[in-house]
Amino acid sequence: MYKLLLVDDEPEVTEGLMMEIDWQSCGFSEVKTAGNGKEAMELVEKMEPDVLITDISMPFMNGLELSDWVKKMYPITRVVILTGHDEFEYAKQAINLQVENYLLKPFSGSQLTETVLQVKRRMDEEREMRNNVELLREHYRMTLPIVREKFLSSLITRHQSLATIREKAEKYGMELGGEGYVVSVISVLHSDKPEEELDALHTVSSIKDLDLKLFSISNIASEIWTRHKLGKVFIHQDQVVLFTVSPDGQVDDVMEATQDALKEILQSIDKFLKLPVMIGVGTFTHDIRSLKYSYEAAEVALDYRRILGINQIICIDDMEDRVQEKLVFDEWKEQDLVRSIKVGTEQELTQVIDELFEDIARVQAPVHDFEHYLLEMVTAIIKLSKMIDDGSGPIFASGILDQFQKLNTLHETKAWFADLCGKVRSRIASRRQHSYKHIVEEAIQYTKSSFGDREMSIALVCAHLHISTGYFSSLFKKEVKMTYGAYLLQLRMEAAKEYLRTSELKTFEIAEKVGFADPNYFSLCFKKYAGVSAKEYRSGLTETSK
């Protein structure tokens, strides 16, 4: 069932349509009416209708202005325009056809019913398409290979938490659990040698298109990689990338299995494709989060082609003296830590800290590497605490580095570090809440001093505060428990009551003082707010005083 708002300044029209049309059977469980555009705006904010039906010619705010506002603020709301023949072309041009339908006046209840049913059918179809499980499954099945490849690419280009990697791997049906990992890269070479010379090296291929070359290499590599049960193969940035995912954590065994399969791939490429290629093999790692470093090492290995020539497998460990795994507090780890402190949940922060200390326990690093790693973690927290310093006093007691030096065990260090992070997180949360309150308080103060200005609006307040209307709207509603429009109206109406109680000003003068350009609209709003007209309200006060 849907919600609908009917807007027309002629009460007999809205009342007649409410009586004549069986809205429930048309699929609308909630139907409200408004007599003008401004009143309609308030109702739209409260009910967020699925369909808006509005007349064009109305006082205070016409239907075109209302439709334009609705399209900006509630873009999924369907709009139907009620218009006369002389307004039709203007309406089409003004709204740029971003409406569901136009209904020309005069129209009958049956015509409006049919229009509403058409809109309802379109919404049903869209909802059914979005919710059709079979269609979704088919679409997901078709796009899954692309999604998987994008995920694999992300493993060699950016840092992700173990929980995120495991969650995505399970979601995409990919087995990536293992004790050892290596990244290898196959690169197609663009040689400057003449074709006759390349032909002598058996490297001339009839395949000229790079995408087709990569696809052909990927097919060969995938077949061999799968047969050897080594892991995953995918195309990334004009290269074919191969993950070795091994249940074996022994470096020599994993590297030997990787290179054996790569030799077979290289022979097959040479035999069937005649393409000049190089294969670089990166460093071994126990940690799937470190695939980025293995990939970068494989890229460095490819640079040695200038020394060794083409159609070779170059393992970086054969060319450079590299430590298999380093204990590094890199920019990705720092970003994860800072993000979890600033905007993450307590559980997310705990998870990040757990992973940082799991790295320490897993990598058998020299003592100075271990101390350097911890010191960089602590330094990141100190930098963050200085960035959020609000003058309310230091977050930490003095001598934080002295405290760090006195820690004896990894367990003790972890508890101390978690406490530091928790203190910074609490200060940020407190400052953010204070900032929210300050923004709302400033908005209220500004509104109280300026509500008599007929131009006063949420846009004016946001311009004064230098923030977006969308952010301010949600923030104001959360703090004050009402929309800004409702608050401004309440402020104006209470001020109007005060003028009626304490002055002899005429109604049109009071309307002007509280920010209404149109006295008739003021009267309409006052009666709706107070339940009686301004005149009746003042008369009631007089009667009470007698």
Image (cartoon, rainbow, N blue to C red):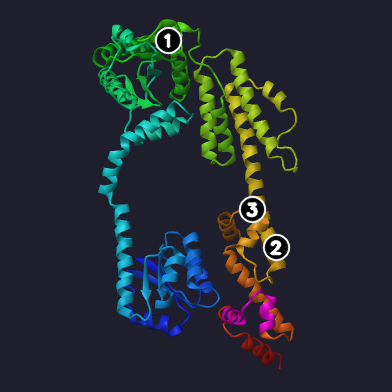
543 vs 403, nearest the viewer: 543
Question: Which callout, 3 or 1, points at the residue further toward the start of the chain?
Answer: 1
The amino acid sitting under disc 2 is Tyr
Residue 524 image-quadrant placement: bottom right
Residue 414 image-quadrant placement: top right
Asked whether the residues under the numbered discs 1 and 2 touch, taking CB atoms below 8 Å apart as contact, a structural biologist would say no
Percent of width and height locating residue 287: 45, 22
Residue hosting label 2 = 446
Q: Secondary structure at mark 2?
A: helix
Residue hosting label 3 = 436
Residue hosting label 1 = 305
What residue appears at the point 37 percent right and 76 percent down from the top-left corner?
104
Q: Is residue 67 above or below residue 158?
A: below
Q: Is residue 144 above or below residue 516?
A: above
Mark in front: 3 vs 1: 1
Q: Which residues are magenta?
A: 508-526
Question: Which callout, 2 or 3, points at the residue further toward the start of the chain?
Answer: 3
Q: Residue 172: tell me if it is visible.
A: no
103 vs 335, nearest the viewer: 103
440 vs 37, nearest the viewer: 37
Residue 479 lies in the magenta stretch: no
